[in-house]
Image (spheres, rainbow, N blue to C red):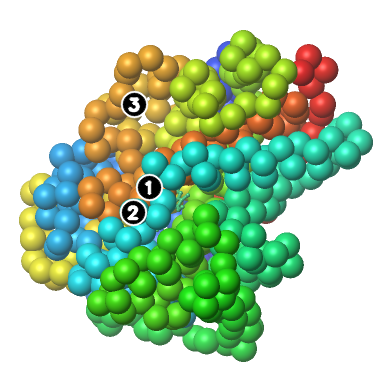
Amino acid sequence: MFRSLRPSTDIIEKRRKNALEPAHANYFKGKSGSLRIMLQARHDFLSIWRRKDYTDHVSSIKLLGRQIVLVNSPDAIRYVVAKRHENFERKTPQMRRALEFLLGDGLFISDGETWKQRRPLVNDIVHKNRLPVFGKIMEKTASEMVERWSAMPDGAEVNVLFEMAGLTAEIISRSVFGNDLGEDGAKAVSEGFESYQSLIDSINLGYFLGFDEGLPVLRTPKLRKSVSRIHAIIDKVVEDHLAGRGDDQSMVELLVRRQKRNPELKLDVVALRNEAATIFMAGHETTAATLTWAWYLLSRAPWVEKSVHDEIARVCGSRVPTLDDLPDLNWCRAVIEETLRLYPPVPILARQATEADRIGDIDVKPASLVLIVPWLLHRTESLFKDAHLFKPERFLGEKRPVPYSYIPFAAGPRVCPGLQFGLNEAILCLAVLAQRFHVRVADDLKVEPQCRLTLRPRGGLPVTLHRRTTA
Ligand code: HEM
């Protein structure tokens, strides 16, 4: 009996001359019973959507005991994330329960007074004015990757998701912790995060069964081990900074200085660790996923890859691209923006309604689950023509999407504070690596988008690396 319930994902990928419809789940056509949807969502949250979900609308269903409101209309999204932000700012019990053991009251899952107090702090330390400092770290780390790849034989096989995760973990680690973490510490922290994610279930069944706060995640010995390893490493760095022994360009140092100036903030070692760990987690997986999807798209669309290569040659010649080149690297930017449209690293923004409300024509009950799904929104045909096609040219020139229709970094007061950091990092790393390498995905590789905390290709993305002779 259960065999027939075992979910599978039907993936579509179409390649024609100068047109690419990259991998995405087909519309869900099965029966929509609660158990079926739960099982399917657990396997793959992106394959539960029907054709009609990819239209501009607001709808509501009941799953077990819980109301779920799907908000897929720019005006309604503005209502939820901006106008009625305070009623919908709360993360879902699923998200809070999954991350609280690791991140405590870190910004990503906090709300109310804690969020209000901490948000300006995090805004300050990742602010775009600090990009010149972080840009240098990005340039240096991407160049180190070029060196490492250059030492491999031409055609070397790597999993580019893990390569990009290593690259962005190194960048965020150097930005957050300065040089204090050391190579082994950085590796231990990113492995700890990776193992933590794999141990967390994607659905908190308790919430759907009626517990408004969800059920606590079972803290298995394995989970405890990865958490205490991460905490111990970060605590040591924070304590060093508090004792005046830290790298003074790093984000941790800025947090510590802020606390010294404003003791009323009461940021103790644990609070400082929570914010540092949050930035580390929020700031590396997302950019790694973006870059991985960009390599997949460029490999399947060589006509776009050529425009990228020509542009880098025109703007930078043979010198390494830098942050100062970004205003002229329009194709690189458009490729990253289109990648973020097709494969938003955070494909689902889930909120819990605090009080009863009304979104569009739908009455929303307290503690309902409100879902904004950038994956659906960005593929809504009335908002993006040829929505499933890879067309970076839609982001060239002055054209911008309708407000609240393009939200890879979310929108409203909870918009990603690392927007500038992440966007610039992705464009710069793409330019530095594409200047020197073709990244090739095998023609017959079946690529399947998978939604965990972030959206990534299931099993990563095996590729081969080829030196560019023209560089
Ligand atoms: C391509 C890269 C990135 C993407 C697509 C991205 C996307 C997002 C999204 C969608 C959210 C909102 C999640 C929600 O409300 O459920 C978010 C929040 C956040 N992001 Fe990013 N992010 C990126 C890079 C970064 C970087 C580089 C940093 C830090 C340096 C960062 C730090 C954060 C933090 C701290 C939050 C929580 C903000 C809050 O709740 O007030 N992100 N990000």
Mark 1 close to ligand 1, CB under 8 Å: no
Q: x and y percent of residue 137 in the render?
A: 60, 45
Residue depicted at x 45% and y 80%: 269
Find disc 3 in the rendering and name its residue: 384
Left or right: residue 300 versus residue 76 is: right
Point out the tag, 1 or 3, that comes first from the N-terminus: 1
Q: Residue 398 at x, y = what percent?
A: 33, 16
> If you read the primary sequence from the N terminus, does the residue marked by circle 3 or circle 2 appear first?
2
Spot occupied by residue 184 in the image (x, y as percentages of width and height): 74, 67
Q: Is residue 65 visible?
A: yes
How crowded is the residue under tag 2: few (<14 C-alpha within 10 Å), some, or many (20+)? few
The residue type indicated by label 1 comes to His
- Judged left or right of residue 309, residue 107 is left
| Alpha-carbon span between mark 3 and mark 2 | 31 Å
Residue 127's label in the rendered image is: 1
Q: Residues within 10 Å of mark 3 (few under 14, many from 20)?
A: some
Q: Amino acid at mark 2?
A: Asn
Amino acid type of disc 3? Phe
Q: Is residue 278 above or below residue 447?
A: below
State whether residue 94 appears in this view.
no
How far across and down, in percent of the image, does residue 19 sit? 55, 17
Whether the residues at callouts 2 and 1 have beta carbons within 8 Å, the answer is: yes
| Circle nearer the viewer, 1 or 3 | 1
At mark 3, the secondary structure is loop
Task: Locate the C terminus and report the quarter of the image it occupies.
Answer: top right
| Contact flag, marks 3 and 2 (Cβ < 8 Å) | no
Seen in the picture, residue 232 relative to 148 is either above or below; the reply is: below
Q: Which mark is residue 123?
A: 2
